[in-house]
Amino acid sequence: MKTPTYHLLWLISTSSKELVRIHVLSNVNLAPLVSRITGHEVTLGDYGDVLRTLTDPNTNFVAEVLMVLLDGDELMDSKDLSAEIPTVIDSFAKSHPEMMVVASTICPSPSTSSTYEISQTKDGRSAQGRAYESAIVEVATANTNVIIFDVKLVFDKYGREKLTSSTFWYAGRIPYTTLWFEECGRYVAGLLDAYAGRTRKVLVCDLDGTLWGGILGEDGPSGIALGEDGVGKCYRDLQRQIKTLLENGVLLALTSKNNRTEVDDVFTGHPMMILQPEDFVATRVGWGDKASSLVAIAEDLSLGLDSFVFLDDNPVERAMISENLPTVAVPNFPTRPELLLKWFVDEVAFPYFPRVRVLDSDRNKTAQYQARNERIAEAESVVDLDAFIERLEIQLDIRTDDEFSVERAAQMTQKTNQFNLTTKRCTPDQIKAWMDSNDHAVFTLAYQDRFGDEGIVGLAVIALSTADIPVFLLSCRIIGRKVERSLLRCIEEFAVQNDLTEIKCLFVPTEKNSVSAEFLNESGWVIEKAEVAGGISYRKDLS
Amino acid sequence: MISDPLELKVVAVVTRELSVPPGSINLLSTSDDVDRWDSLGHLQICMALEAEFGVSPGLEEVGQINSVPAIIEYLRGMGI
């Protein structure tokens, strides 16, 4: 999940913070756990020494955290111990108020005999286990320095079969498999990170394909997937989880390549949005690169980039951040929406935003930061965009009058609103007629880079007799990668081969296509007439 | 130089599980001549075989595969 570069920098960035020393007590052999609680100092008591360590006033281990991680089956075999442990933990916590005590729940196997009734009775293991658990929870409720590590989370996730091993139990009193040690190690390390304050503070979210399904610029506010059924529910559930993080004190920020007004329309008008504009401490909606947006947000909030986690479904945007801002955490993004919820909990919330407890002071974090001044949306670029684009290894396949692309070409004219000079909508028949005509040429552009194949994402049409370009558009999925320049260059070469000395186009401004005007201004076009039928006419000299 | 991929991997797993410097485990190493290859170290090696090679040595095999050659022979016997 993490690139080596990122991991290294993360370690450097948190090295100034204290390591947490943890002492682990258990009734079984947990030696393999020591190396798996990474980033902290772990010591292990002799197994079977739990009671003595907790009750002996001369106990001498040096640690900020004491963890009592017990095996359920072993504990259930010793009824006295299971009754005594909660009381003993309670006394220990009271006499060591400076120490955090982590008590695990237990997960005993349901039954060890062949009768069906035993686990149901009050003497059965399940009942015993429940009694132990409620006693432990009571202790945690009564002592602010006691917290629960719910080992059932791990058992629920993988199942007992994969987590327990008879071989190593009989060979050396190790009841668990490597998987158990890895998972528990990860949870405990996360808990200690949280204890040490090693948590990230800001979650930066993209919109299209991340907080909702689909592309706002193409599908429109009513066409995006967000709701209480099917794919839309996947995104709504994700928004709910993000809202929970917000309530736990995590700051949210938005970066999206979209038009601001359309995004505002969704926030104010879409009935299924869980997240609201006031939930975000910073919003950067525009067409600039996201690395620069993140830097601007970090400056606004006076937070280091190593406090940031970046969520984006687009692998190119993720590479943009991880290559240019290596201290920002950039988790992978699931390709199937139904995995979003589980992924977010397992791969984002727990690893990056662990909290030991949520305090009241966490809850109004967003309000504190919102009081700061908002800056303008477009940040000055802080990255070498050209170098990044070069590393994408973009391959374009630009074809002229390709009959296999008629349907897709027509579809793009119907859906593309942002990078589209005229937003002229065409039918397949119209496209086909242009392809067949000697006077017109239709250019389709297919795009792929090292992250994948986007298919046909660009379209341009030229009429030789008038030197006019009635269609020039690019899907918003690839805006910002300078692909439009290659498409324009092809048209220019084609025009020159056909003895044209200039090309012309009409720009029809809409609420959404200002990004196309920027392109015209940057690529050598000049305004011929500022007011002609419904738009602005441009010309470009080719001589 | 070890060139066989299985042999290389076994040496790497043993080195890692015992936390000994690279190069201190070779194709002839046994639990008798490596200090850190004690009973706990041995269990960690056997547990790692499960994760690395997908094999689960039984209790009796755990007692027998206490050298690099024995581990390699065991793995080959399992068709790896």
Image (cartoon, coloured by chain):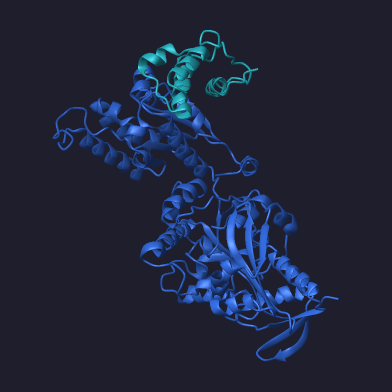
Chain colours: A blue, B cyan
Instruction: Look at 30% across and 43% down and name the residue there.
Output: A138
The quarter of the picture where residue B43 lies is: top left
Height in image: A402 above or below B75? below
The picture places residue A255, in percent across and down from the top left corner, at 59, 64
Badge count: 0
Between A177 and A277, the residue placed more toward the observer is A177
Between A517 and A413, the residue placed more toward the observer is A413
The picture places residue A542, in percent across and down from the top left corner, at 82, 75
Height in image: B34 above or below A12? above
Residue A50 appearing in the image: yes
Left or right: residue A225 versus residue A41 is: left
The picture places residue A229, in percent across and down from the top left corner, at 36, 65
Direction right: furthest residue: A543
Left or right: residue A226 versus residue A500 is: left
Instruction: Look at 57% across and 24% down and name the residue there.
Output: B5
Q: Quadrant of the C terminus of chain A?
A: bottom right
Height in image: B43 above or below A201? above
Between A514 and A474, the residue placed more toward the observer is A474
Height in image: A376 above or below A467? above
The picture places residue A93, in percent across and down from the top left corner, at 39, 36
Residue A426 appearing in the image: no
Q: Quadrant of the N terminus of chain A?
A: top right
The quarter of the picture where residue A444 lies is: bottom right
